[in-house]
Image (cartoon, helix red, strand yellow):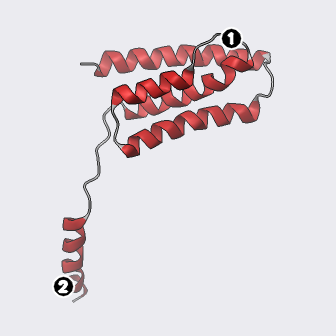
Amino acid sequence: MLAKTLAPLFLTLTLTAPALAIDPPYQRQMERLAEVMGSLYYLQPLCKAGSEDWRAQMSELITLDEPDEDRRQRLAGAFNSGYTGFSRLHRQCTSASREALTRLLVEAQQLVRSIHTRFAE
């Protein structure tokens, strides 16, 4: 009896629900790259370790990827999360900050290489 009542409702919801976009297979790596770039955006000026504009690089990466609005928001959120996470822990450049900066640069290079090798056309 309950199934007969819910079946039309379920069918209506199924037919009217918007289609969810499917993430590309590299989405997880892109979000991690965005988080790393946000971290670098905070740490690099703190330690006066270069002049790369990680925010501009992230903006360009998002533009080139042409994500839908949901993915764009997640990439921007990951970038902001990386920035915020390091800004809470590092107020001045210390040896730990410099080590984190070095490790993040290596990770960023590895992520870019992996994404390009596996998914570039």
* Identity of the residue drawn at 39% across and 41% down: 71
Quadrant of residue 7 within the rendered picture? bottom left
- Image coordinates of residue 4 in percent, x first then y, are 18, 85
Quarter of the image that includes the N terminus = bottom left
| Left or right, residue 119 beside residue 92 | left
* Identity of the residue drawn at 50% across and 29% down: 34
| Left or right, residue 24 beside residue 83 | left
Q: Which residue is mark 1?
A: 49
| Left or right, residue 107 beside residue 46 | left
Q: Disc 2 on helix, strand or loop?
A: helix
- Image coordinates of residue 80 in percent, x first then y, are 58, 36
Whether 21 is drawn above or below 35: the answer is below
Q: Disc 1 on helix, strand or loop?
A: loop
Quadrant of residue 28 within the rendered picture? top left
- Which disc is residue 4 wearing? 2
| Left or right, residue 74 beside residue 11 | right
Q: CA distance from mark 1 to mark 2?
A: 67 Å
* Identity of the residue drawn at 78% across and 15% down: 95
- Image coordinates of residue 74 in percent, x first then y, are 46, 41
Earlier-in-chain disc, 1 versus 2: 2
